Amino acid sequence: MKSGEPAEETTTTRTPPPPPQNAVHLNGHTVTKNHVADASPTTQHEVSQCEDRPRAPTPVLDTHVPREQWGGKYEFLLSCIGYCVGLGNVWRFPYLCYRNGGGVFLIPYFIMLFFTGVPLFLMELSLGQYGAAGPITVWKCCPLLKGIGIGMLCVSTLVCLYYNVIIAWTFYYLGSSFQSPLPWSCDAPANAALCGNLTGNGSSLKSPSEVFWNERVLGVVNSKGLHDPGPVRWPLALCLLAAWIIIFLCMLKGIRSSGKVVYVTATFPYFVLLVLIIKGATLEGSLQGVAFYLTPKWGRLASAQVWNDAASQIFYSLGIGVGGLLSMASYNKFDNNVIRDTLIITVGNCSTSFFAGFAIFSILGHMAWRKGVPVDQVADTGPGLAFVAYPEALALLPGSMFWSILFFLMLFMLGIDTLFGNMEGITTAVLDEFPQLRGNMKHKTMFLGALCFAFYLMGLLLITDGGIYWFTLIDSFSTSFGLIIIALFMCIGISFFYGVNQFCQDIIDMICHCPPWCTMFLWYFKACWVFCTPFLLLFILTYIFIEMYNTSLHYGPYVYPFWGKALGVCIGTTCCLQIPIWAGVAICKESGTIVERFKKAIRPLNSWRANNLSSSNRTEEQVEPERVEGPFTVTLTDMDFTAMTWETASNA
């Protein structure tokens, strides 16, 4: 038996669990720390005296459940790429490119990427990885800004609500693609008369794909507008239910399950895009479509709309400000190189958008050649491109059923990955606020099931006859000015309240051996966070407000009433109002004058650097301890010892 063992036994019997640790002196009182074998006689004497005194209630030790981590680096990279590379890369970027001057659009696009997208992307990844917490809990770095996390949660909820409806539409088209001939092609017997009339006068009649979309899928012809949603379309309701069941099963075990799924869902779309590019290059008229896609119109650079479209596309395609990036980064190892990952993901995302344009416009060019019309008459954006124009183009190809199945499988994979990220933002935020759910698989399963079922019930409104009107309303305002304001306050809060120099030092602490190129990039990012990014966000915000005031919201020929547009503004305002509301709560919780309360509210909590200490095995960390004024009783937990530097030597 070793000589240290009796000391351990004595210590354990004298003090019921937990056994005492090194004695330290705080404001004249002796406090013991746990898990140290030997204790000095002075410490044990003081402990015995304390046992004779009336005790305060025994403090409840932190039963924090360890967070999961990604099974490997590629799981995180693929999850982020799958989250960023979504439906917008396929149906929005190509349209914006040809509408805003073709190849010229790439100039403002990449400028906005490197001065707005990449800096904000790195900020979210670094914040989540350093704090190892979701979008709400992570703001213990600056409690005044907790409302940013609540706002992110609101935006993510709205996005999840309507985004899975797109996956339901995709399921419907995927099932219909197994019919031969395709039900939206001219070869279908039901469309024979329609196609015959269309050939005689193409400008006055709708195509079979438009009729299939509006009548068979949406049923929008049976609704008069926003005020007349009509009955639920039950085929779509079954597709939506299937979509939410798939989401539930894939996320049941957290990143351990979703991290494996992304090996398929994040890589399969690239295979399909490559196949479509090769197929499109062999079609007659494809070069006409590619030329229309890339032909530069230099005069468009002087238009403010071009720059706004470039900034908004970068902003939305990267998924900034929704909380998904922050949540996924929170499961990283502390020493992961976030700068390298940021460059890989952002450049990969934007390259995918650019090359997706070739796959789209080569086949649209063939469609225009077959119909004998200009390309701009067959090009469209949003759902019109994914569910009307492109399916019609695929119906003209030999083996159209195969190409249609492949295309809608790709849309499903793109949508499911993005939804993983948004759902991860919601679940991580809730599990961090209620950590007992994380350690209980049964309760976690019930929570996830209830969340998915609630989203399903709310989503039924969007698959009624008039559901497309509600879909367009939520889509237009959920990620509009509210999201820009959230990102703006996040950038300003980290740069000026938390401190841009401290934030850069945190990044260096994570990377550990920071190579020279990382240090150079940090200087660039620091300049962006302080000057460039806030200015560009203000520009986007100003343009959005001007455009929202001067233009009306519409879907096709239907113009939204004033009350509908006002409802959309309320949706966006609800998200960004969380910032001042929770800032007021944080200030009210503090004591002193308004200035003193403000200063205390922007100071990081003691547990903010716990992840840094536990990961790097440091014994010292420069964190200012909270001031304790006697004669108040202070209850300390293990987290206080690991987050602050304590004086272990007795005062003489």
Image (tube, rainbow, N blue to C red):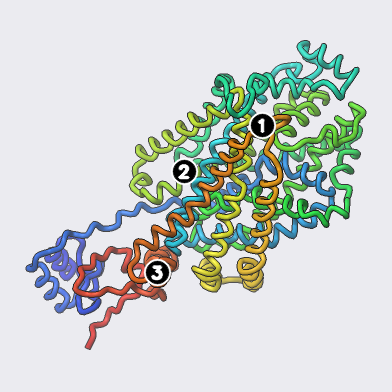
Residue 144 x, y percent position in the rendering: 44, 62
Q: Is residue 510 left or right of residue 292?
A: left
At label 2, counting other C-alpha atoms closer than 10 Å, the crowd grade (few under 14, some 14-19, many 20 or more) is many
- The C terminus: image quadrant: bottom left
Residue topped by disc 3: 594
| Rendered position, 598 above or below 545 | below
Residue topped by disc 2: 254
| Rendered position, 106 above or below 234 | below
Using the numbered discs, state the Cα–Cα distance from disc 1 to disc 2 in whole angstroms.
24 Å
Q: Amino acid at mark 2?
A: Gly
Residue topped by disc 1: 409
Residue sitting at 65 percent across and 21 percent down? 219
Q: Are marks 3 and 1 in contact (CB under 8 Å)?
A: no
**Is residue 3 visible from the viewing direction of this image?**
no
Work out whether residue 380 or residue 10 is closer to the camera in this orientation and state it: 380
Residue sitting at 65 percent across and 63 percent down? 533
Work out whether residue 209 or residue 259 is closer to the camera in this orientation and state it: 209
Residue 598 x, y percent position in the rendering: 42, 68
At label 3, counting other C-alpha atoms closer than 10 Å, the crowd grade (few under 14, some 14-19, many 20 or more) is few
Element on which disc 3 rests: helix
